[in-house]
Amino acid sequence: MAMTVPKWRAVLLDFVERAGWSAGQVFFATLLAGGAGPVGELPWRLSLTCAFGAFVSSLALTAVQYATRLTDLAFWPDLVARLVKTFLGSLSATMLAGAFDVFTFDWGAAFNVAFLATVASFGKGLLAREPAAANGQVPAAASPSTLPTGTYREAVDHAPAPPTIAETDPPDGQKPMGSPA
């Protein structure tokens, strides 16, 4: 028997999963883009600031995705949507962390961070995917999410919830169909 979580909790977990991964990917991409050096000289404060910005940006972009009901996607469109959101979130987080000024902003570094975070997001999406079917095709229920499949499906599916047992019981005084009279 598969355990299911309530819809609200599944959606909350989906938001946290997406935003958490975006923050982590941007954090490490910012550290990597800062170059090699002693641990004390790495851009820790900038990385944390960018990660927080990416977390908030991911929450906002995921809210837009849910509001427009673009969540119940097949594997590849879902992965592409995640890549676009990671790129945009990373770019906006880098801009906000650098007190954005179009004339003095380091666009090269911002695109480097966005590119590295997007590559990390692509790798995570491929690693999170369930194994391919025997014919090599991506299974219909596959997702680039690291949430359990049931929780992810509960969060993104738009179908109404199935009726409960109490809702399917006949009204009081009536016998169910097919029962002896």
Image: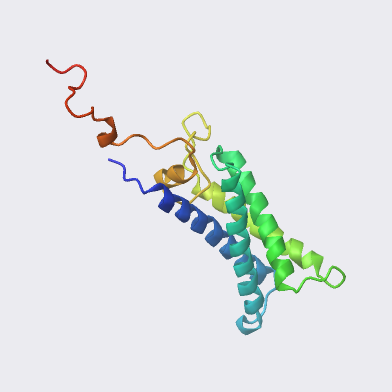
**Relative image position of residue 177 (x, y in whole percent):** 21, 18
How many marks can you see? Answer: 0
- Residue, far left: 181
Left-right relation of 130 to 47: left
Q: How is the image coloured?
A: rainbow
Q: Residue 42, located in which quarter of the rendered image?
A: bottom right
Image x and y of residue 102, in percent: 84, 68
Q: Is residue 114 above or below residue 75?
A: below
Residue 34 x %, y %: 70, 73
Quadrant of the rendered image containing residue 108? bottom right
Say if 91 sits above or below 167 in the image: below
Residue visible at 49% across and 40% down in the picture: 142
Classify residue 3 as left or right of residue 23: left
Please state, as top left, top right, bottom left or bottom right, where the C terminus lies in the image: top left
User: Is 173 located above or below residue 106 in the figure?
Assistant: above
Q: Position of residue 40 (x, y in %)?
A: 62, 84
- Which of the pair 4/163 is nearer the observer? 163
Q: In the drawing, does residue 118 fall left or right of residue 166?
A: right
Quadrant of the drawing holding the N terminus: top left
Q: Name the residue furthest right.
A: 103
| Residue, far front | 173
Residue at (52, 32) in percent of width and height: 136
Q: Is residue 128 left or right of residue 167?
A: right
Query: Which of the 4 image quadrants contains residue 105?
Result: bottom right
